[in-house]
Amino acid sequence: MAHDDAAPALPNDLSAFWMPFTDNRAFKARPRLLASAKDMHYFTPEGRALLDGTSGLWCVNAGHTRAPIVEAIRQAAGELDYAPSFQLSHPKAFAFAQRLTAILPAGMDHVFFGNSGSEAVDSALKIALAYQRAIGQAGRTRLIGREKGYHGVGFGGISVGGLPNNRRAFTLLPGVDHIRHTYDPAAHFTRGQPEAGADLADDLERLVGLHGAETIAAVIVEPLAGSAGVLVPPKGYLQRLRAICDAHGILLIFDEVITGFGRLGAATAAERFGVTPDLMTLAKGLTNAAVPMGAVGVRAGIYEAVTESAAAGIELFHGYTYSAHPLAVAAGAATLQLYADEELFARAAGLEGRWEDAVHSLKDAPHVKDVRNLGLVAGIELTPREGAPGQRAAEVFQLCFDAGVLVRVTGDIVALSPPLIISPAQIDELVGKIGEVLGRVA
């Protein structure tokens, strides 16, 4: 399979770009470059096809360079290149906000726009603090995250996050604590949600006892932890966490930057699990990643408390130059329409069984320690090499790239999250090539 477009010229100097979350020295010695993309495939500058098993970076849910989204961006760029959102805006921003809230849980009637998941998280944390102050609970300043959580790279996000490598080199926010993670190393090769583990939510009660509920503003969790290696919530866990938050007046924030927009076979993980948070962060699949955008879904009572309690003038001193950027709004509106026209959330739900069987077929492949899955996402955990954690998975990543499939690795876990348009045959191709690579890795 080859792409029709002419191959672009290769850069002759890679030094200027300091790449994020990358071993820059190793990459620049052996670069992996993507030149174009279409539907389920990336194409290298040489025209070699790569089956995308990761939706880019958990984000291209509808497939690459889809015509309706491309045309919407093209039209928007020629109509309104930029409009500020400070004391001004543009009509399509309001129309898109209304359309977005229509697929969010009932009662989540407002959205605050930013430009990424990281910005959405920091915005949600600030909104939670503003709300507690607005209702006379100014002493509630403590934020609670979860071990192994990932909430972007803002100072708020890394503080409530629980991935050590993202935190150890930076000064963190004070007054932050963490409940324990949901990973049970004994529950290997679980299909879907683990049966046991709902009681892990009770660890929040430990922090309430330690700090006092009157000091805690909010708890933020990923419904399914993605960057930690696909940690699926036990049955009843999120329901129990919701009940504990309600009992103590603590806001519950779902970080749905990964789980939103069909990844779990529903518009949101909140819908999938039947648990409604107070705030919800969104990004990635919001615009199919065609233009950067983030958002916070906000329960009506929170918005009303903050806006109605404030003195005349600005109610929340927070925002971004590019909030509700016209091109992002156009991409988001076209993306939501495409999801609806092609019924992609339902399609993902319909493929879940086939996907589950395929990824669990790797159970007996060399080096496989565990397989976890839910919706169209899976984590294949490998046994690490003695004294060299992460190296086996890194080799799998490179060999898969060479074999024509794109996967993501985090530590010794191969994470998969293909576009929702993946076909059964492409599922078999993706998993089959991973199996072949595992057979070649020492």
Image (spheres, rainbow, N blue to C red):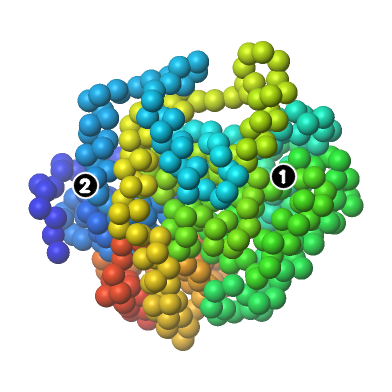
Q: Answer with left or right where residue 199 lies relative to residue 55.
A: right
The residue at 58%/67% (across/down) is: 232
Task: Depth check: give the residue in front, 124 or 158.
Answer: 124
Q: Quadrant of residue 17?
A: top left
The residue at 76%/40% (across/down) is: 217
Q: Provide residue 260's location: percent of width, then percent of height.
A: 48, 53
Query: Most extreme residue toward the bottom, as rendered?
Result: 364
Q: Provide residue 21's location: percent of width, then percent of height.
A: 47, 47
Asked if the residue under mark 2 is in contact with the one under mark 1, i.e. CB atoms within 8 Å, the reply is no
Task: Depth check: give the residue in front, 371 or 236.
Answer: 236
Q: Is residue 230 visible?
A: yes
Classed neighbour count for the residue bearing mark 2: other residues with Cα under 10 Å, few (<14), some (14–19), many (≥20): few
* Quadrant showing the C terminus: bottom left
Classed neighbour count for the residue bearing mark 1: other residues with Cα under 10 Å, few (<14), some (14–19), many (≥20): many
Above or below, comparing residue 423 to residue 34 in the picture: below
Disc 1 to disc 2, how far (Cα)? 40 Å
Above or below, comparing residue 76 to residue 442 in the picture: above
* Quadrant showing the N terminus: bottom left
The residue at 49%/33% (across/down) is: 114
Q: Quadrant of residue 300?
A: top right
- The amino acid type found where label 2 is placed reads Ala
Tag on residue 251? 1
Q: Answer with left or right where residue 138 lies relative to residue 427.
A: right
Q: Quadrant of residue 432?
A: bottom left
Residue pointed to by mark 2: 67
Q: Provide residue 387's location: percent of width, then percent of height.
A: 57, 68
Secondary structure, mark 2, is helix
- The amino acid type found where label 1 is placed reads Leu
